[in-house]
Amino acid sequence: MSSVADIESRFHFSREMLAGPIYRKYEKAIRKVWSVEDLDFTKDALDWQRITPEQQKGLLGVTIRFLAGEQAVTDELVPMLAAAHALRRFDWTMFLSTFLM
């Protein structure tokens, strides 16, 4: 079991980190978080039924490419997060993690 001192040493933020520009970016990013559950897709579902199969296939192609782009972002961010953590730059770690939300 980890001691309180061990935990505190791993998650310590300096006053400089909390007052710095990276932490401000983190705070701004957190304020912009939204949830897909907050959206009403009723009209979209009806619109989907109205378009042709060719149009549906085209939209699915765009969607797949979007998801591939999101995966690429995740693949790039994970090593950056690990590096920021290794450097004990927890402000960077917090900010970069907002891109995974």
Image (spheres, rainbow, N blue to C red):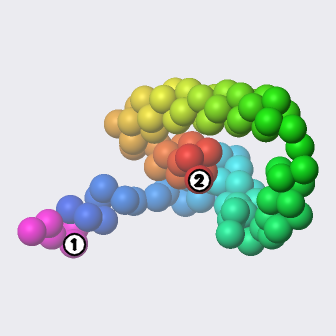
Residue 80 shows up from this direction: no
Range drawn in magenta:
1-5
Residue 34 shows up from this direction: yes
Q: Position of residue 17 (x, y in %)?
A: 56, 52
Toward which corner of the image does residue 84 lie, by quadrant?
Answer: top left
Toward which corner of the image does residue 79 lie, by quadrant?
Answer: top left
Q: Position of residue 83 (x, y in %)?
A: 41, 32
Nearest to the observer: residue 68 or residue 17:
68
Q: How would you classify the magenta stretch by its main secondary structure?
A: loop
Disc 1 residue crowd, few under 14, some 14–19, many 20+, Cα 10 Å:
few
The circle drawn on residue 97 is none
Q: Which residue is mark 1?
A: 4
Amino acid on which the number 2 mark rests in the picture = Met
Residue located at (83% from left, 52% from top): 49
Q: Which residue is mark 2?
A: 101
Q: Position of residue 9 (x, y in %)?
A: 29, 58
Q: Taking 79 as reference, is 1 above or below it? A: below
